[in-house]
Amino acid sequence: MYSKEVMDHFANPRNIGIIENADGVGKVGNYVCGDIMWIYIKVRKNENDEDIIDDIRFKTMGCAAAIASSSMATELAKGKTISDALKMTKQNIADSLGGLPAVKLHCSLLATDALVEAIYDYLSKNSLPVPDDVLRKHERIKIDLEKTEKMCLNPKAQENSLKKD
Amino acid sequence: MKRIYMDHAATTPVDERVMKAMNPYLCERYGNASSIHRIGHEAKEALETSRQVIADKINASPDEIIFTSGGTESNNFALKGIAFANRDKGRHIITTRVEHGCVLNSCRWLETQGFKVTYLGVDKNGIVRPDDVSQAITKDTIAVSVIHGNNEVGTVAPIRDIGKICTEKGVYFHTDACQSFTKVPIDVEKDYLDMVTINAHKIYGPKGVGALYIKKGTTIDAWQHGGGHERNLRSGTENIPGIVGFAKSVEIACTDDITYMTKLRDILITRVLSEVLDCTLNGHPAQRLCNNANFSFKGIEGEALLLRLDLHGIACSTASACSSHTLEPSHVLMAMGLGAEDAHSSLRFSVGKENTAEDIEYTIDILKKEVGLLRKMSPVGGINVQ
């Protein structure tokens, strides 16, 4: 079911843990839905005075694809400038993992969302300008979260699924 | 690497004695039981001897046993066959919310064909109340179908009480006994059964063979048409090697195996509950199959735990939404009132007669280690989660 790369990152996840005094934290997902992902970043300036992700850690509760996606996202983002890290897509993560099953693609989206949220947290906490697309993503992530929470918490969902053809 | 198979509710290995019994019917006695020459006779004889063995096990007569391709076919046949044959009497069928998918999906399909289906709830242990069955029966009801041993949580349903109600009210009673067959005694007379689904590959027999017990006098339509095999109720050349293997697997099933599996199951349940924090047992504590242990581990997603155990050679199963094609949590656990989070974190171990006490020991050690590791990785850590 899973690629060699997914199994490798699942069996030996990179960058697990938290960063005390992190510069930004992104928390996405929902316990009821079965996936929660938290990403912590430490930011420093490089020689060109650009913000780069100096350290990055994650904590994830989820399936093998969710854990592997978090691990890969942290690997890909580490050392990148903030603006480069923001260019990362769910497809980049899935591709780097040698592909994900179609039903698991949302796991790689969750990982990019967690990273965007961590960067948003860093920018807004430091009163730095938040680029339009980051703001849009942040709004979209908030709405997505509310939607899935509603879906997962709805006790009728099970009943309806029993009735649908 | 070790290979510890603890997923016997999914399927079992074929017992060597079963394989030996089947072997001659592949290359030497390959006849078609419908042929009238001697080679055909050999096959016919094996077919009828096997039928007798299986009938005896549930106190039925041989002509009440119809061989099929397995549990799914038997359940489809029972429900659709009974519904269509009796649709002039009524259009209402009663089942439960904890059935196997093949019963639920057959019922959902029957709903598209003009039948009404009631899906009864269960208590927190997965038990359907006979009173609820009684109250759900109307003048329009033609059949009740209740799973005997639940495939996910192992809860054993009170089929005798339900059967009695059905007989008194004049409606057919069917049970899906795929998981319980040879583990929990079934007596079609004493249990008031009109139809029973059984199969071979859960009891050390081969895949692709099962049977449906149909009580004499039951009004049921054939669901597979053709050359008129199996008293015109299930056409198709009989799978003689499979049927011979099925009968052998029934013959070798013994109470010693049940006692042994119960012992392993109880060690597993007792030690996991006492040694792993924030862990609960799903299903009835006592009225459960001798081989089933189903747990929820808070703060962990079941598929991840299953695959971490697989890395150590331990094979088990989960009803986590993440492991299903639909990403929906287990309908059985949800019907029992578990929160979605506990359904996500469920893991089913089903032991078998070839497991050893060392296997259980090893599994518990690895399980403790991996639960700890995943909880360390988990933002909610498993403790005090709302």
Image (tube, coloured by chain):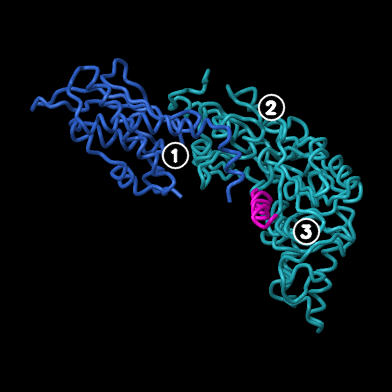
Chain colours: A blue, B cyan
> Disc 3 residue type?
Arg
Q: Which residue is mark 3?
A: B87
Question: Residues at badges 2 and 1 in contact (C-beta under 8 Å)?
Answer: no
Q: Residues within 10 Å of mark 3 (few under 14, many from 20)?
A: some
Name the spot of residue A161 as percent of width and height, x first: 57, 43
Q: Classify residue B71 by image quadrant.
A: bottom right
Secondary structure at numbered mark 3:
loop
The amino acid on which the numbered mark 2 sits, given as a three-letter code, is Thr
| Magenta span contains residue B367 | no
Query: Badge 2: few (under 14), some or many (20 or more) residues near its Cα, within 10 Å?
Result: few
Same chain under badges 2 and 3? The reply is yes
- At which x and y percent is residue A86? 23, 34
Q: Determine the chain carrying the residue at label 3.
A: B
For image coordinates 8% across by 28% down, the residue present is A48
Q: Mark 1 or 3, which is nearer the eye?
A: 3
Q: Main secondary structure of the magenta part?
A: helix
| Disc 1 from disc 3: Cα separation | 48 Å
Q: Chain of mark 2?
A: B
Q: Which residue is mark 2?
A: B270
Query: Residue placed at 28% from the left, 27% from the top?
Result: A56
Q: Are marks 1 and 3 on the same chain?
A: no
Magenta-colored stretch includes residue B107: yes
